[in-house]
Image (tube, rainbow, N blue to C red):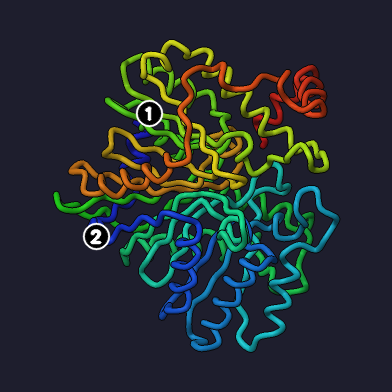
Amino acid sequence: MLIRNLFGSLPTFAVEPDQFQVLQSALSFREYLLEAIHNATSRIYLVALYLENDEAGREVLTAAYEAKQRNPELDIVICVDWHRAQRGLIGAEKAKGNAAMYQAYAEKYEHAIPVYGVPVRNREVFGVLHLKGFIIDDAVIYSGASLNNVYLHYQDRYRFDRYHVIHNPSLADSMAGFIRKEMIQNPAVNNLAETDLPSTKELKSAIRQFRISLGKSSYGGEKQVVGDHQVAVTPMVGVGKRHNVLNQKITALLADAKQEIVLCTPYFNLPKVVLREVKRAIKRGVKVHVVVGDKTANDFYIAPDQPFKAIGGLPYLYEMNLRKFARANESHIASGGLSIHLWKHDNNSYHLKGLWVDRRTMLLTGNNVNPRAWALDLENGLLIEDPNQHLLAKFTAEFDNIHKYTQRISSYSQLETIHDYPVKIQRLLKKVIRTRADRLLKRIL
């Protein structure tokens, strides 16, 4: 009853099918985003884990600043994770992080743009801003991508994600309203474009209260009547394990599936409740397709000829999870009840997430469907209900494009074992498993 009440209180927006667009590549996503920023007339809200100080990040920030200088009345807000913005890349030398760039831009231009640092927890390892969605005028551009070279395919490599555009003023107002009311007005959130910033320690109490507030928050808006010629879009947000409507909806979608489930995740590390519902679905005859990146397409992957770093062990740990799952379900793989698709394209990486159930319900989300997303990070998603399958052709074309670089696994034995891994990776993983540190790593990474 509680779950039904939580779902029932959420807003629903009626969207015309021709106002729903699917972009098929990182490059087209970048081009669309830059053009939308250039043509914006009323607002630009950009929310991402990070906006990087590299060529692509500077291109996006410059485009926003140029739009602001042309039209100072333009409402521009950028939100990034507080912790991520104030450190360098993992494994790199200590640096001031991307906040130094935000401050330099604010100093350079007449009309500054606030770049809000959103602290979901007192330490990054225990929770980050993983909210998704760029709102430009009346359009919502939704992707799991952050803003840097690899996500935007600025140079040779790209990180493949999903990219959707929904034109709907009410949905855009709801998502922008959440950012303004539930996030940037909170005293724990500060403008990283300013130089006199409080320390995380000074914000400790405010951050704790902010997280409690986020746990009670939801998107605003009415429950619109959705006609037979329209699709319903419901934005939802969640943080933490308790009363997390997004987690509950993912679980409910899996439990209610009748014919088919398509699950995309970049890291095969499913929460126990999700793994349980996937297994139940397979047993009741639902065809389950899992689309996951090959270990070499993982964003933490480090080639054997590159300097070794411990973080490079994660893709192998995820592959061990996948092999264990495949082995336990070998009979279902053989019968076709379970299909595992490994994505790999040259030296590019894979970052897709989301659910497609019975080809009528789609969840667009930045949620990795792993224990970290389930319990630590601030996540959101857009539930697309399409009982008349107006979007079937668009989603089919999207998944045809995704499968272009996937290989279907016919047996668990196709996946490598720990004995096949580079020697340094073997040593690391054996130590991790021996000390049971893998249990902790799977919860926080």
Vertically, is 169 above or below 157?
Answer: below
Residue nearest the viewer, comparing 3 with 317:
317
Figure disc tally: 2
Is 87 left or right of 40, judged from the image as shown?
A: right
Structural crowding at the residue carrying mark 1, measured as other residues with C-alpha within 10 Å and reported as few (<14), some (14–19) or many (≥20): many
Q: Earlier in the sequence, mark 1 or mark 2?
A: 2
The image position of residue 336, as x and y in percent, is 36, 19
Structural crowding at the residue carrying mark 2, measured as other residues with C-alpha within 10 Å and reported as few (<14), some (14–19) or many (≥20): few
Residue nearest the viewer, comparing 249 with 19:
19
The image position of residue 187, as x and y in percent, is 64, 63
Work out which residue is located at the far left of the displayed protein and give it.
228
In this rendering, which labeled residue sits more in front, label 1 or label 2?
A: 2
Q: Say what secondary structure mark 2 lies in.
A: helix
Identity of the residue drawn at 28% across and 33% down: 358
Q: Say what secondary structure mark 1 lies in.
A: helix
Mark 1 is on which residue type?
Leu
The image position of residue 169, as x and y in percent, is 32, 67
Dots 1, 2 in contact, CB < 8 A:
no
Residue 18, labelled with which disc? Answer: 2
Vertically, is 73 above or below 18?
Answer: below
Alpha carbon separation for disc pair 1 and 2: 28 Å
Vertically, is 438 above or below 169?
Answer: above
Identity of the residue drawn at 76% across and 36% down: 304
Mark 2 is on which residue type?
Asp
The image position of residue 256, as x and y in percent, is 31, 27
**From the image, which quarter does the N terminus lie in?**
top left
Q: Which residue is mark 1?
A: 254
